[in-house]
Amino acid sequence: MKYLILLLRWVVGVLFIFSGLVKTIDPIGFSIKLEEYFSASVFNMPFLEAYALPIATFFVIFEIVLGVLLILGIYRKFTLWSLLGLIVFFTFLTFYSAYFNKVTDCGCFGDAISLEPWESFTKDVILLVLILILWAGRKHIKPMLAKPLGKYVTAAALIASIFIAYQGIFHLPIKDFRAYAVGNNITEGMKSAEELGLETTQIQMIYHLRNKLNKQKVRLTEEEYLGNKNYWSGGTPWEIEKTEDRIVKKGYEPPISDFMIDCGDEGDKTEHYLEVDKLMFVVTSIPAKASEKGTDKINALVDNLKGSDIEVLSLSPYAIETNGVPNCFMDPVTLKTMIRANPGILLLKKGTVVGKYNWNDIPNAAEVQKILN
């Protein structure tokens, strides 16, 4: 039992550290996921949306600290109770998401690893079982280091986590797991499975039917439904309650699916801008919450770039004041995915991202020209 508990300490501890770390790298991304849970369509707690970022930051750092404490074997009672509370909470969330199909990706591992809802739930159930075993064998959890040293290691992990989260919030994530990372080509990321000669995802439609006479309910595949006219012909007592898509076989899905530059009367200019040799996107995902200081810094940069061969385009969810720069529209979720800054800039060469900057780190005009040359 002693060796099993030691093994599980490392397995659970490393999983919590990894899960917390990938989200600590990008706390804004996890806060966006929490906003989904707080929205009216899920838990209807809109009053918490304003606090999504501090809540997200606390939880991701707490995950790392708990993983470290478990491996070190210190503060045993606090650690086990906290782990148990967290995993019960996460298990409830992932079950709710999977069963009611509310949030399609729990964000358990940030953007590093995407899990289907039922995969997330299964992962949490396994972790719950492992933590219960740890609780049952808690007497075998002994400190790995002398107590003062263990405290120093924990403090170091906490400080490092806070620093990483700070970078992700006030600058940019130290590691970009998204499709718009520096070095990625947006055009390539939009190509379908057919264009790349890869296997597509196979989806099957499921019909949920209800008999108006005897209240019987059935679930049928599209083939079963269409193949039996008793379910759909005139005078049938069966009515469709809802339909849903079920993935039969997972295939390739393009990492970029919602990138479209809508320029109003000029229409869709996505293809045009992705072919521009030297391009700077000014991204404002939430204009009402955009930093005024950041906007002023970017406007100054835009002024200094006037007369150069660099094309500048403002992207926002709706029309905004842009200091004379052309303004086109894009889905706000896509804008938030492109860059974790409000506002921020992306530098592109023929669709390839060559630079991304939070407004706190805006380069000068000479640096922008050097990057794009």
Image (cartoon, helix red, strand yellow):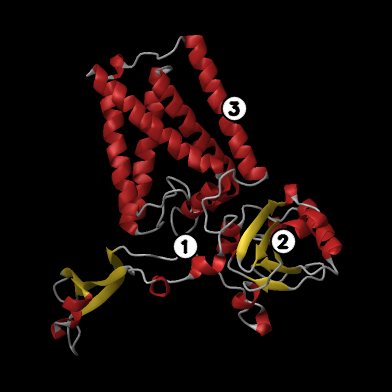
Is 345 displayed left or right of 23 in the figure? right
Q: Residue at x 58, y 48 (%)?
A: 28
Quarter of the image where one finds residue 274: bottom right
What kind of element bears circle 1? loop
Question: Which residue type does callout 1 highlight?
Answer: Pro
Question: Marks 3/1: CA distance?
Answer: 33 Å
Residue bearing the label numbered 3:
159
Residue 208: x, y in percent? 24, 70
Cα gap from disc 2 to disc 3, whole angstroms: 36 Å
Quadrant (top left, top right, bottom left, bottom right) of the C terminus: bottom right
Local SS, label 3: helix
Please, what is the three-letter code of the amino acid marked with disc 2? Answer: Leu
Quadrant (top left, top right, bottom left, bottom right) of the N terminus: top left
Outermost residue to the front: 373
Looking at marks 2 and 3 on the same chain, the residue that comes earlier in the sequence is marked by 3
Looking at the image, tell me whether mark 3 or mark 1 is earlier in sequence order: 3
Residue 324 visible in image: yes
Indicate left or right for 161 with 320 as reference: left
Please name the amino acid that badge 3 sits on. Answer: Ile
Q: Residues within 10 Å of mark 2 (few under 14, many from 20)?
A: some
Tell me the number on the disc at residue 255: 1
Residue beneath disc 2: 372
The answer to the question of whether label 2 and label 3 lie on touching residues, with beta carbons closer than 8 A, is no
Instruction: Give the residue at the far bottom of this rendering.
Output: 234
> Which of label 1 and label 2 is nearer to you?
2
Given residues 204 and 175, the one toward you in this image is 175
Quarter where residue 312 is shown: bottom right
